[in-house]
Amino acid sequence: MMTKAQLRARLKERRAAMDPQVLAQGSHAIVQAIVASEHYQNADALLLFAPLKGEVDLLPLVRQARKDRKRVAFPRCNPQAATMEFYLLEEGARLMRGAYGIPEPVREAPLCPLTERTLCLLPALTFDPCGRRLGYGKGYYDRFLATFPGVAAGAVLGSMMVKEVPTEPHDRPVSCIYTEKGLLPCKPLPASSIATLPVPAPEAEEPKATPLGRLEHTISQKCRALATSLGKRAEGLHRALYAFAIPLHTPPLLVLTVFLLLLLSRVLETRLVTRGNELLLVILLQLLIFAPAALVYLRLHGKGFASRLRLRLFRPERLWFLLCVLIMMITGGLLCGILTGGIESLRGNFTLYSTFVAKLQGNAGQVIFVILAYGLLPAVLEELVFRAVLCAEYERYGVPVALLVSALFFAMLHFSFPLFLSYFVLGLLLACTLYVTRSYLAAVLLHLLYNLFCLFGQPYLSAFYLNAGSNEIFLFCLVVLFLLFAAFAAGEARKIYHLYAKRNEDSSYTVPVAPKEFPKRLLGALSTPSLLPCLLLWIVLAILDLV
């Protein structure tokens, strides 16, 4: 029998001599065979590969899988740690040149969750009838398949298959093979060829490892060893730990930067406000607090990240949903404020971040400046950071985690213990609006209207409260309005999502989270050292606000 190197060289020659038309026709037939198979029909996600020259082209499966509401992911290799993970290819996103020149998802792409229903399609130079695979010698797929819980299948032209592939103990076979003739179930492996040894290092020499690469490799090996020691029920533990331990959690750093700039603004506000340009100062300070931090953050993440921010218009038929949520924001904010600060919390001027106090005295020109400084500008800038950016970042842990974490940071932004609950509820409602309408501008509009209510609606609210003559009647009206419009909003959201499903619109950002996995994912999102200074700074400023 030939060695792997000899067989690899011969097959590369055979593939180079293949007629491109034969390859294209064969690829089309293989795609059709995959779509017609039971494995595809039962799959919740497809793990594909970007074809190299001469490989089967499965890229047409991307469009078909999205029509069938299945997630699509591509591998990203880490040469320093010699590991490979699959990341989702979102609608509108493109593959970028990565390790070894192979196209891969952008750095900001979310990690694809792996289940028993995930179908992984493997590239190869050849397969044999037992499912043994001959790749390119680096061992990435063998290491990946060691903990992969789903179905592994090969994709290759029948003319490239051989009777037997020379194997080593670490080689991982596939369970079936797709060729242009259809699905080929694999024969059982001889007992002597079943893997019993750990996966060795790749045959080819890898690039020199960096300190970060060595750290990632060490963590990966420790997680893998822990999963192995715990048995079959912990097969996914390595993947979960690795996914949450390795990424550098940068979103709290963005929030911390905003908090520090807000702290600096307090000093500037007390020194410059006496110069008679308070409104211009408020506008300028807000721009300096939010805009540079957000723009630098987006710049560091690249162009691909901006496509995930939902910077688009919302459909006019969403206006009824937005009105329902707006009434929920007004009544819910009032109820939370009364719960934490008493009925007296309804009185007083509108303030931003416990620093800037809105004053409505003056002519029409000054009122316009007040609306810009205390209404429009906070809505645009806060929604950009705390909804568009943070929700896009934390979606990798699941949408429920993104909702909670973004609302948490938004509530902390205002540096007030009594107002924390109010702003947390408002943050949740605004984040829900972002996801239901899939529009950042819808959240901006709601935020603006809520700010305008706080600026100009308080006198009418106080008049209603005085005419009611009873705290109980006033609270009863607020509760009834909140619950009534919550029911309206839920019904309208159901209709909107039904339309999304009917139109087969992309929903790959909705990483499924089982109830038992939710605490682990939430902890993974919050378990970062950069969150601690954010929390400490918020506590200090909130205490100062009470004093």
Image (spheres, grey):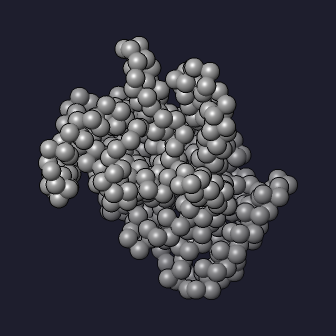
User: Is 91 left, or right, of 14 in this rendering?
Assistant: left
**Nearer-the-camera pick, 431 or 91:** 431
Q: In this view of the protein, can residue 372 be seen by the observer?
A: yes
Query: On the image, which quarter does residue 230 sit in?
Result: bottom right
| Above or below 28: residue 404 | below
Seen at 70% across and 75% down, the residue is 222
User: Is 211 left, or right, of 268 in this rendering?
Assistant: right
Seen at 64% across and 43% down, the residue is 263
Quadrant in which the C terminus is drawn: bottom right
Task: Spot the residue most to the right.
Answer: 208
Count of numbered badges drawn on the protein: 0
**Nearer-the-camera pick, 155 or 67:** 67
| Above or below 287: residue 143 | below
| Above or below 134: residue 427 | above
Q: Position of residue 405 (x, y in %)?
A: 48, 56
Q: Position of residue 522 (x, y in %)?
A: 49, 64
User: Is 403 left, or right, of 354 in this rendering?
Assistant: left
Seen at 19% across and 45% down, the residue is 466
**Nearer-the-camera pick, 534 or 372:** 372
Quadrant in which the N terminus is drawn: bottom right
Query: On the image, which quarter does residue 449 sit in?
Result: top left
Q: Position of residue 450 (x, y in %)?
A: 33, 37
Seen at 36% across and 50% down, the residue is 345
Q: Position of residue 411 (x, y in %)?
A: 47, 51
Q: In this view of the protein, can residue 119 be seen by the observer?
A: no
**Nearer-the-camera pick, 418 or 133:** 418
